[in-house]
Image (cartoon, rainbow, N blue to C red):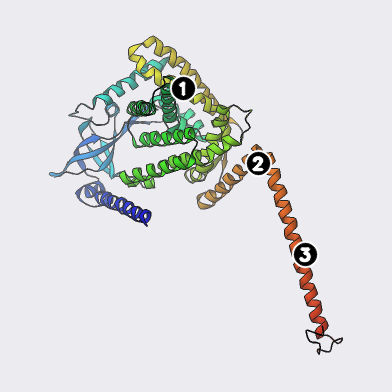
């Protein structure tokens, strides 16, 4: 009863917040101005890192900036409201950091279907009256810019992929490489994901253990380091989710207790949905949760099934992407109705390369300002590994049948779910042949017992029917009673 009561309270809280957000989006003067497409002058606060919108030539022609309105002036009226918007602006908007307050003029437009923002603002001016952002955010932006400049000597694929994997800056990513990684299911490697956050957190925990720190200080150091990494990348909603889900995945695998990891995951999902109920409609959030759930429920068993002669790191490099893919596959086909034939082999090959890219690249970020020579060496090594990731994606994308068509909608989801179940069964059977033979033998024995039982019952049924025919036949004349018979 207590659990039911708490669940109802949490559901009521999420529903109330969703209703308030929906009313703010679809009702009121701001919603009317958006529907009418009015020209406005808005004072907004930057809520996330700017994202480059590449043009046909692959260059960043415009920037998309998530903001929250503070004041909107249109037609002589001043509207004070806090509503999420997306600003589409020129190059000047790419230098903003979260926490800054700016003023701009532009035209309001309705949001695209499925988006959680109240609308978009096509900025016709550069951001004016820019306030200084938080110190950490300003420092993080400067480090990101310096890192991109320091990596300019790398070859094109590494020059575009390395900043994305380390700092989340995908502005220099080649469009052809991006399409190749999308075709083979490696899109999560083009920017910071839960895997990167897990690697950073795991490396910090290893260092703390190396210096024999007690459990509480080690946890504090690891969380502080992860928080700085999130600030470096940018505190976007996707990054915060990746950090949280990555931390849960590492905690579950390290602790070896899937029940505890599952409890942490449930608490994290509840907290994120209460803070932002709109995440319930986000495929990115759903995929993050499913990937983490797959690692928690299936990752550890698959690792344990693999023979002990196989190195533990190799077993994990196969088990982690496989377990995540099994649960994410049915949802991915809803977004992109095709089957990435070589997604698992490509991710398995790329998995050992992600760690040096993330760790060496992240270590090089502060050294860009402190010790540029050391940073150049680390960037060169990390760039070589990122080039290998890019080469893996391009090679797999060029193989015949790399992207096969798949049914759309519910049939595609159900068929992919069936394929995931069959894949899991094949992996179990391949990794544990003795258990498979034992199960086959048990099934054979059970089938024999069932057939024998059916034969006995059929024999009894035939005997009873023959007695009945004898009683009712001419030999008895219908006068036999039970005792005589």
Pick the residue in front: 433 or 367.
433
> Is residue 190 shown left or right of residue 32?
right
Mark 1 and mark 2 in contact? Answer it, CB < 8 Å.
Answer: no
Please tell me which of labels 1 and 2 falls first in the chain.
1
Sequence-earlier tag: 2 or 3: 2
Observer-side mark, 1 or 2, equals 2
Furthest toward the left, the residue is 76
Q: Which residue is mark 3?
A: 455
* For residue 214, above or below residue 240: above
Q: Give whichever of 226, 389 is nearer the camera.
A: 226
Would you say residue 114 is visible in this rendering? no
> What residue lies at 39% left-to-right and 33% top-to-bottom?
243
> Local crowd at mark 3 within 10 Å, few (<14), some, or many (≥20)?
few
Residue 107 figure quarter? top left
Q: CA distance from mark 1 to mark 2?
A: 34 Å
293 displayed left or right of 73 = right
Dot 2 falls on a residue whose secondary structure is: helix
Q: Residue at x 51, y 43 (%)?
A: 327
Q: Is residue 285 visible?
A: yes
Q: Label 2 vs label 3: CA separation?
A: 32 Å
In this figure, which residue is indicated by the disc labeled 2? 429
Provide the residue designation for mark 1: 357
Q: Position of residue 50 (x, y in %)?
A: 32, 31
Residue 62, picture quadrant: top left
Using the image, determine if residue 133 lies above or below residue 147. below
Q: In the rendered view, does 91 fall on the left or right side of 159?
A: left
Point out residue 178 in the picture as x, y percentages from the top left corner.
47, 30
């Amino acid at each position: 009863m207590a659990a039911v009561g708490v669940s109802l309270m949490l559901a009521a809280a999420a529903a109330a917040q969703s209703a308030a957000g929906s009313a703010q989006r679809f009702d009121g003067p701001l919603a009317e101005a958006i529907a009418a497409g009015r020209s406005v002058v808005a004072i907004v606060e930057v809520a996330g890192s700017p994202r480059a919108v590449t043009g046909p030539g692959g260059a960043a022609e415009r920037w998309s900036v998530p903001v929250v309105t503070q004041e909107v002036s249109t037609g002589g009226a001043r509207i004070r409201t806090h509503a999420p918007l997306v600003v589409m602006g020129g190059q000047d908007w790419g230098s903003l950091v979260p926490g800054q307050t700016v003023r701009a003029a532009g035209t309001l437009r309705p949001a695209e279907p499925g988006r959680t923002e109240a609308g978009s603002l096509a900025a016709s001016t550069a951001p004016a009256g820019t306030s200084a952002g938080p110190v950490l955010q300003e420092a993080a932006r400067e480090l990101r810019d310096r890192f991109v400049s320091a990596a300019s000597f790398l070859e094109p694929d590494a020059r575009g992929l390395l900043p994305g994997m380390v700092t989340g800056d995908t502005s220099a990513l080649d469009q052809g490489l991006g399409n190749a990684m999308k075709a083979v299911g490696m899109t999560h490697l083009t920017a910071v994901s839960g895997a990167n956050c897990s690697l950073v957190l795991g490396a910090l925990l290893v260092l703390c253990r190396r210096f024999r720190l007690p459990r509480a200080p080690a946890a504090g150091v690891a969380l502080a380091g992860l928080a700085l990494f999130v600030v470096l990348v940018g505190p976007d909603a996707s990054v915060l989710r990746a950090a949280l889900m990555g931390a849960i995945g590492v905690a579950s695998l390290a602790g070896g207790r899937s029940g505890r990891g599952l409890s942490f995951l449930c608490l994290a999902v509840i907290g994120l949905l209460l803070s932002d109920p709109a995440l319930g409609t986000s495929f990115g959030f759903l995929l993050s949760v499913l990937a983490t759930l797959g690692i928690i429920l299936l990752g550890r068993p698959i690792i344990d099934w693999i023979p002990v002669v196989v190195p533990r790191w190799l077993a994990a490099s196969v088990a982690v992407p496989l377990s995540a893919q099994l649960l994410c596959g049915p949802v991915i086909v809803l977004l992109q109705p095709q089957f990435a034939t070589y997604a698992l082999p490509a991710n398995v090959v790329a998995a050992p390369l992600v760690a040096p890219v993330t760790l060496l690249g992240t270590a090089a970020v502060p050294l860009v300002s402190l010790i540029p020579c050391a940073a150049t060496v680390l960037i060169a090594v990390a760039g070589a590994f990122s080039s290998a990731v890019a080469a893996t994606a391009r090679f797999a994308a060029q193989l015949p049948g790399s992207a096969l068509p798949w049914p759309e909608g519910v049939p595609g989801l159900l068929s992919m779910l069936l394929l995931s179940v069959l894949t899991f069964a094949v992996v179990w059977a391949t990794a544990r042949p003795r258990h498979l033979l034992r199960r086959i033998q048990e099934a054979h024995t059970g089938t024999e017992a069932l057939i024998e039982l059916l034969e006995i019952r059929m024999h009894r049924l035939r005997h009873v029917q023959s007695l009945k025919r004898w009683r009712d036949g001419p030999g008895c004349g219908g006068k036999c009673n039970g005792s005589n018979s």
